[in-house]
Image: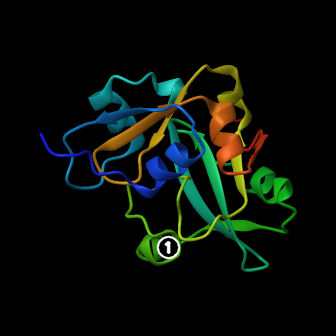
Amino acid sequence: MGKELKTNAMRILDRSKIPYEIIQYECDTFIDGMHTAEKTGAPVEQSFKTLVMQGKSRQFYVFVVPIAEEVDLKAAAKTVSEKSVEMIHVKDITAITGYVRGGCSPLGMKKQFPTVIHSSAASYDKIYISGGRLGTSIALNPDDLRKAVQGQYADIIFHP
């Protein structure tokens, strides 16, 4: 078998000597996080999606939230000291991050944007995030991810 093709996310983890596990699954088009967890067998509560938003100031932000949850836009904006934040348009994902929809990792984007990881991640030994391309997930320690993206933990999900 040929050499594993590394994504930017994996290269950053390798450079930082952060241990991680690669989980590959069959996928050639966008599927949501719930389907990804189903395909990989990853626990839903430990599986996180990467959302890119833009604040009123035009600055971009990365929010890493549980796949079954929704971002509370007010809480997210407050966490990054913005008046408001909104999701970037799907068509802009690649131009802004360098990744495709469904393969967007919080690690290794074109630029390092301020990153907020939902506080529930801190309670797990490992979480699952996108590996930086369709069909690839990465399992790693949430504190290692937080250090690698110079991020912070915060409660940024919607509570009904």
Residue 29 higher or lower than 125, as above or below: below
Examine the rendering and report whether any part of residue 70 can be seen. Answer: no
Q: Which residue is mark 1?
A: 89
Left or right: 69 in relation to 29? right
Examine the rendering and report whether any part of residue 50 can be seen. Answer: yes
Left or right: 61 in relation to 101? right
Residue drawn 64% across and 58% down?
62
State the quadrant of the C terminus: top right
Give how far across and how far down residue 159 sits, in percent.
72, 36
| Helix, strand or loop under label 1 | loop
Residue 11 higher or lower than 36, as above or below: below
Q: Quadrant of residue 7?
A: bottom left
Total residue callouts: 1
Residue drawn 27% across and 30% down?
39
Amino acid carrying label 1: it is His
Give how far across and how far down residue 23 sits, in percent.
33, 33
Label 1 Cα crowd, 10 Å radius (few <14 / some 14-19 / many 20+): few
State the quadrant of the N terminus: top left
The structure's colour scheme is rainbow
Give how far across and how far down residue 86 sits, in percent.
65, 67
Q: Nearer the viewer, residue 141 or 72?
A: 141
Residue 49 higher or lower than 160, as above or below: below
Residue drawn 41% across and 46% down?
131
Residue drawn 76% across and 53% down?
76
Give how far across and how far down residue 134 sits, in percent.
30, 52
Q: Nearer the viewer, residue 143 or 35?
A: 143
